[in-house]
Amino acid sequence: MSQYLFQQLINGLALGSLYALVAIGFSMIYGIVRLINFAHGDLVMIGAFSTLALVTAGVPWPLILVFVLTIGAIAGMTIETIVFRPIRGASQVTGFIATLAVSIAIQNSALMILSGQPRNFLFPAGMRQRVGLGGVNASLTDIVIIVLTLALIAGLFLIVYRTRLGTAMRATAENLTAARLMGVAVNRTILAAFAIGSALAAVSGLFWGGKFGQIDPLLGFVPGLKAFVACVIGGVGSIGGAMMGGYILGLAEVLFVGLLPQEFSGYRDTFVFLLLIVILLVRPSGLFVRQTEERA
Amino acid sequence: MLEIRDLNVFRGATHVLKGVSFQVREGELAALIGANGAGKSTTLLTLSGLLRPRSGTAILRSGGKEFDLTRLASEKIVRAGLIHCPEGRQIFQSLSVAENLAMGAYAQRDKVRIRETLDEVHSLFPILAERAGLAAGSLSGGEQMMLAIGRALLARPRMLLLDEPSLGLAPQVVEKIFDVIARLKSTGVTILLIEQNAAMALEVADAAHVMENGRIVLSGTGAELASNDRVRQSYLGIAA
């Protein structure tokens, strides 16, 4: 494999990891409460700025990862408790508008507190070097992002498919009434879905800063939107689909930029959203969900 | 075991239960019969905490304690020993058969007893052991009903609410289900059964209550109601 192709592959997988982490939580939340949560991307921003604050405070990196997961979980649970729980059972439009309101509130609070000035954000020098792999080389940051993301996703799958909480989450997502009749305290299960999904989004923010080197209070908007696209690609409500959707999106973006003439590279998001439209036309329930299965 | 007093329940603007009162004694199999829309399922949903009454009480006496079901959260009602096996089976289609049964035992903590109960359910319905790893949605209607009942049994009910367990099933399966209901009763489980098949329900029931337009209009033993002219005409399809 040529060095160029290999680099693009690693780059696409790293970008896909960022999208996948956000998309999975987006999908989990939709699956369990049928809420298209447009505030979900802002957890990425919260994760990124939390990382910056922790780095400034001199906290060691492995601990930062744990703290960012925790901060994300707490932020997600707070939003669920004070905004989404009171409107449970209201129409989907109400929920949708509430998520937009939360997003605008978070973004503008961040602008007020942090100012709109972008901040530089650097991983430690040791992580920014390139490593050789049999004749080709890649950015260590990208490799760390990919490996940690896959580990987190593996952990998530263990929780969702191998634990009592995970079984209850899947049961609640499928049939909330029946889950209540089994003695599931559904509010707690929903809270757990928000906690897990938001923790993953916050870690994506940590990676986002490390990969792009700059963060600002509005950085959550794009990953939130891309997570939505990734979910549509994979089938909204399916965790595996969201993950695959994230990676497909990341690789497709890098491919667009890499293969198209230079003057088109500024339009990568145009191609991403064209992809969304095509998939909505051709396979509206996603690539990884059987067409007969009811998801929406 | 269960004492329902003057229950008034609204669904939206509709007054569905209009002062429902009746009792179910410990160890009894009680049947609730009536036409569609009479309020039978609404009664069960209120007892399991999914609907809240405008007024009235429902007291469950279980394990030496008293619970007011109209105030208790549904997950606490399950832990008090009242298990509701809902209309239309409502199994988790995307979960495996084994996972559905595990969800039944969700509120149980004692792993040894869960294992024992699972063995009992498997011996009642061997098909559930054979199909343990399959998605529940791939089962036939009769198997899904067995799964729904098996799942309810894993919750170790002291009192079981059964909503239309025979609906849409082949006669052999219905017979099997009623067999299991009789066995459950013999182990001391109190049962409140809603049944479209009134003849079958009255045959097995110790007590029965007839519901019309959100009110209990007639109560008696199964045999009494089976010989009541009004019941025979309206629900058993026998000319007086």
Image (cartoon, helix red, strand yellow):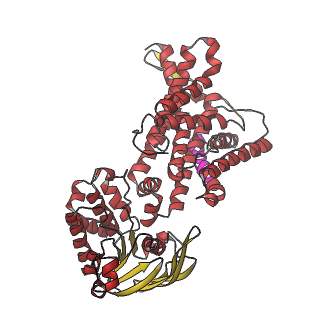
Q: Residue at x 35, y 58 (%)?
A: B100
* Nearer to the camera, A252 or A8: A252
- Residue B191, given in percent of the width and then of the height, sits at 34, 78
Q: Quadrant of residue A276?
A: top right
Q: Which residue is drawn at 24% across and 67% down?
A: B174
Residue B35 visible in the shown view: yes
In the depicted structure, whether residue B200 falls above or below residue A107: below
Residue B30 located left or right of residue A188: left
Quarter of the figure with the N terminus of chain B = bottom left
- Residue B198, given in percent of the width and then of the height, sits at 30, 75
Q: Is residue A68 magenta?
A: yes
Q: Quadrant of residue B41?
A: bottom left
- Residue B98, given in percent of the width and then of the height, sits at 31, 56
Quarter of the figure with the C terminus of chain B = bottom left
- Residue A177, given in percent of the width and then of the height, sits at 46, 62
In the depicted structure, whether residue A52 falls above or below residue B70: above
Q: Which residue is drawn at 29% across and 81% down?
A: B205
Residue B108 located left or right of residue A209: left
In the depicted structure, whether residue A172 falls above or below residue A140: below
Residue B2 visible in the shown view: no
* Nearer to the camera, B224 or A219: B224
* Nearer to the camera, B225 or B80: B225
Q: Is residue A95 magenta?
A: no
Q: Main secondary structure of the magenta part?
A: helix
Residue A78 located left or right of residue B165: right
Q: Quadrant of residue B202?
A: bottom left
**Magenta span covers which residues?**
A60-74
Residue A12 located left or right of residue A159: right
Q: Residue at x 42, y 39 (%)?
A: A289
Q: Residue placed farthest to the front in the image?
A: B239
